[in-house]
Amino acid sequence: MTDINIRPVSTKADKRAFVDLPFRLYANDPNWVPPLKSDVMATITPGKNPWFEHGEAQLFLAERNGQIVGRISAHLDFLALAQPPEQGMGPGVGNWGFFEAEDAEVAKILIKTAEAWLRDKKMVRALGPLSLSIWEEPGLLVQGHDHPPTVLMGHHTPAYGAWIEAAGYAGVKDLYTYHIPIDVPLPPLVQRIVASGERNERIVIRKVNKANFDAEAAIILSILNDAWSGNWGFVPITDAEVAHTGKQLKPIVFNDLIRIAEVDGEPVAFMMTWPDINEKIGTFGGSLFPFNWAKLLWWLRAPKVRSMRVPLMGVVKKLQATRLASQLAFMMVAYIRDASTRIFGASRGEFGWVLDDNGPMQSVGAAMNGEVNKVYRIYEKPL
């Protein structure tokens, strides 16, 4: 018999233990970036994360000899359940995430516990890790453990992949991030494409207006839900989630780093870039108190970073697979790249994640002399 006890998270103390566990497991990993505990707590709390308006979750803890040694979530997203099965989600597909385990035995029992919860909910297939959704921290890091992740990207123990596969899972989709040097001239071909676009009077590439952020966010949401709707794993983002994310990330929203492309006055594409706040909060030990909040506010006045992350980029469906789409993409890249180096002092960009079958976005990364620096894997298993 095992001496591991699995229990559902049911108290505030349990939630704190759930949030605190990685701080012990990764204490000696120089490439793990401690998240702000308050942010993680908000993510897993109904009423604070609008994901719970269309999803339900159960969190579990593993305990051995009085010590917490593992955690996992099991959850359903009702918007994902309504998606076409050929796009990866769909009816009968449940998820698990927030997976952390001290050893293989703990991992095995945690995954079995999540699967049992999903079966009780009549799910027939498990897809994970998703923490909590495809839009938050999807996938397990399987390549790129030797350097820290950028903002809102995960970092995991290298052994986890083998433990998940030992539970009967197989990889179904890889997500790539690209390292792109931005302190060097643009490749000549890209320069020519951008110059051609600048001569086209139909095209306007404008900065977002942070003072009118709600309206700008609505434009971006409309483009995003259209542009990504055919992608594997797509789940529509709700207005509430956009508002929540906008409020959460507004401190690292800068007019120069988010561009909207218009053709004949119609918004048809966007590119969003954030300074890598991980470079600052990584020194905070998970808390803004007692004085880290002041340090962060001071830094946010005029942040200087090494890295920028491009988390989202999209072109409306009707323009996808056209030369104009590529032109708009490279123009936005060029303008944001210039601001990133000139204003924020950045020397590298990270582009992604990008699906392993998304040829056009992979081509953009390659054209910018980018190299895949991290791979995140989503696994599946019939239940």
Image (spheres, helix red, strand yellow):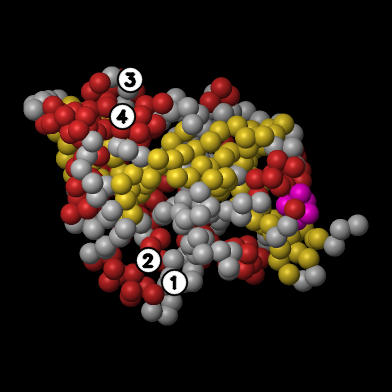
Mark sitting on residue 280: 2
Mark sitting on residue 321: 3
Alpha carbons under labels 4 and 1: distance apart: 37 Å
Q: Is residue 108 magenta?
A: yes
Which part of the image, by quadrant, shows the C terminus?
A: top right
Q: Amino acid at mark 4?
A: Val
Q: Amino acid at mark 1?
A: Phe
Front: mark 4 or 1: 1
Alpha carbons under labels 3 and 2: distance apart: 38 Å
Residue 217 in the image: above or below residue 268: below
Q: Identify the residue at image location x=49%, y=38%.
A: 175
How packed mark 1 is, by other alpha carbons closer than 10 Å (few <14, some 14-19, many 20 or more), is some
Front: mark 3 or 4: 3
> Is there any visible trace of residue 332 in the rendered image?
no
Residue annotated with mark 4:
315
Q: Looking at the image, which is closer to me, 28 or 109?
A: 28
In this image, 143 relative to 262: left or right? Answer: right
Magenta-tinted stretch = 105-109
Identify the mark nearer the N-term, 3 or 4: 4
Residue annotated with mark 1:
284
Identify the mark nearer the N-term, 4 or 1: 1
Q: Is residue 204 magenta?
A: no
